[in-house]
Amino acid sequence: MTIINLYMKKLILPVCMLLAAHAGAQLNIVPMPAAVTMGKGYTVIKEPVGFIIYDFDETDTDDNDGSRMFREYLAKQYGIKKIKEGDSRSYGLPTEIHYGTPDSQQAKGSYELKIEPKRIYIKGDAMGRFYAFQTLKQLITVNAKKEVTVPVCTINDYPRFAYRGMHLDVARHFFSAEYVKRYIDYLAFYKFNTLHWHLTEDQGWRIEIKKYPKLTEVGAWRNGTIIGRYPGTGNDNKPYGGFYTQQQIKEIIQYAADRHITIIPEIELPGHSSAAIAAYPELSCFPDEKTGIPGDMISEKSKAATGKLVQETWGVFEDVFCPSENTFTFLENVLDEVMALFPSKYIHIGGDECPKEAWKKSPFCQQLMKDKGLKDEHELQSYFIQRIEKYINSKGRQIIGWDEILEGGLAPNATVMSWRGEEGGIAAAKQKHNVIMTPGSHCYLDHSQTVNEDSVTIGGYLPLEKVYSYEPVPKELNEAEAAYVLGAQGNVWTEYITNPSKLEYMIFPRMTALAEVLWSPKEKRNWKDFERRLPQVVKNCDNWGANYSRAYFDIRATVAPAPDYNGVLWKLESNQPGAKIYYSIGKKNPAGTYREPVLVRGTYVVNGMAAANGRQGGNILSQAFNFNKATGKKITLASQPSAGYPGNGAFTLVDGVQNEKGFARSGEFLGFGGTDCEALIDLGTPQSITSIVVHSLRQQASWIWQPLSVSVMISADGTNYKEIGLTDDFVKKENGRGTMTISFDANQARYVKVKIENWGNIPAGNPGAGNKAWLFVDEIEVK
Ligand code: ACM
């Protein structure tokens, strides 16, 4: 909280404000507008505020520009009284807001905002004017005289991408209709224009369908939920669920439309369909088989049940829609009601993570494949998607699918959402299909945003800087191909996001970084300047009473090799303005002033803390070091880890830090996508050694598998190596971690070569089956 208070004080100092106003583009706006010209001084918004309307374009009848909302905002936030609708011309107003339509050349949503000392002009289409009001909201400062002011300036602004999306999974955990509106408010404020609403899943069906009442009577409820991170520590045995009535959905769609946000509904098929199958078992190829939920994850009530169940755990499940005529009729009827509710051009039909096991076992599917001349189950999935696409196209709409819809042949008019990296998006754009980029590496806001994460997240490490660095147009595309990239989207999967507060913690401030990626011209993006504006982003959250992550302001530690490979250095930093850093070795309370990296040469705990204003009380960061003969020594890798999980280079494996938290702290691991890890450690001098311990991760829901094997070779001279042992025994610890140990009689060695073999392809029946497994290694000990 200190950070924020500090900034608030700064912000209300008139001197700072004037400096800011004179220094050019020093506006505290996110996303940064395309062009800003600062003037001198500021305009005071007084009561009553009116709008003088100039219709520059007689044909523009869209008055859904948020002007009413803006007046209400001024009244609510600043006590500035609004005048009656239609009365504006009769008031002699100190501030006038003029608005009209944009140049026809500009992108939809463009606007011009001109603030003069006595007048404010707004020009734009309805969407553009709406965005001008969002910008105005961000420009308002209350000065020392308690005047509500905006700086004199001219802003010419337009969006870089036409698709600026945020996603929300309301199936793993349910968010009330009221809260969804609040989420929409956040999106609108930061100029997003699309909400991708993930409405159906294995764990719950959330949209009322009149023709199939059991979808919500049965499919919206589960008997319990696994506790903790998958595979969890049991089931909470608490009935859980919820759904939106069609009336609520209509209201939410209107609420979004009033804020220039289109909602794209997602009805998942053919996979992730357990909830629908629980309601109507005949949608499965095996209607009489009980739903599989592993024994230690299932609720007591479901243990006793005999038939289909709404899922209670996370991942990917084999029981999927059977491609029967009955299923297609069902889906068409469901889609009819969905399309009647949602006016969006696009309907998202899922298409991701559909295991093919059930189809392989089903005589019906095998016969269907023969009849249709389909050579494998991927082509059967393609047949499924293409039939649905044809239906949706026949109603004048288009489909979006996750990038798996590329497999087995892309449906002719489909838009592809690239999530397993950029490859799907690149392939689709090259095939002249529209693309929305949402790669896990940069756009999955369910990943953890700090290496100090203490709450459960699904894994992956996506700090704010990395979101900000995202470039939605892959460099592999030429200009013509790049035009197929409509934009990008932040995804919010809610397996471990159980309530609004956690949701806000996950999206703020990362969503605002993505807002700038999507809106601001590429050449305008500037991380340093975004950092300068971050305190305002945080202040916006405070004003709304929204939670947010303080990760960016947390104290940060890095471990580096000590000179001459003797020990390791613990380096501390803080982005907290004006913060002093304190540290301690062993003792709990950091009291010594930190001036230089701490030299660590033993097994002990070090603590650091950043505190502003000379006051202590910030978060304490504790780090345990485990020393062994390899710690801090020279290490080289035969091949590098994957770009998304580089850790802190090869040194990560001998830095004395043994990951304790699992995947949440993936920055402590090197990740190898489908490849082996081969490390060569130079102990400096010949030493007597008796064992090698490799620390790695098993997080199969995230496609991370333990090593297939570990083997060790040693050498005294670096030339002649002898093989000393091999193991495939993975000893499990908590948080998905585990060790593999090779012990042997004492041997003299200076060089230790450790080969850690990737599991290979993910076996059938597991999340990501058929894909290459990830290998995550965090430490190699030599004892
Ligand atoms: C996805 O994250 N399964 C699209």
Image (tube, rainbow, N blue to C red):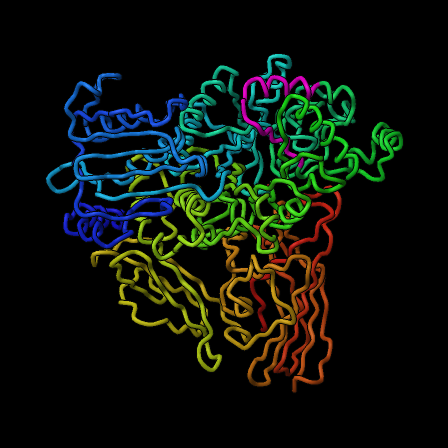
Q: Quadrant of the C terminus?
A: bottom right
Q: Quadrant of residue 529?
A: bottom left
Q: Position of residue 199 (x, y in %)?
A: 56, 27
Q: Nearer the viewer, residue 406 or 778?
A: 406
| Location of residue 646 with respect to 687 vertically, above or below | above
Q: Would residue 157 be counted in the magenta stretch?
A: no
Q: Is residue 415 left or right of residue 112?
A: right
Q: Quadrant of residue 227?
A: top right
Q: Position of residue 602 (x, y in %)?
A: 44, 72
| Location of residue 434 with respect to 280 vertically, above or below | below
Q: Is residue 203 left or right of residue 323?
A: left
Q: Residue at x 51, y 16 (%)?
A: 245
- Magenta span: 330-351
Q: Residue at x 72, y 30 (%)?
A: 320
Q: Position of residue 517 (x, y in %)?
A: 45, 47
Q: Residue at x 47, y 54 (%)?
A: 469
Furthest toward the left, the residue is 145
Q: Would residue 346 be counted in the magenta stretch?
A: yes
Q: Quadrant of residue 206?
A: top right
Q: Residue at x 30, y 23 (%)?
A: 68
| Location of residue 261 with respect to 329 vertically, above or below | below
Q: Nearer the viewer, residue 193 or 778?
A: 193
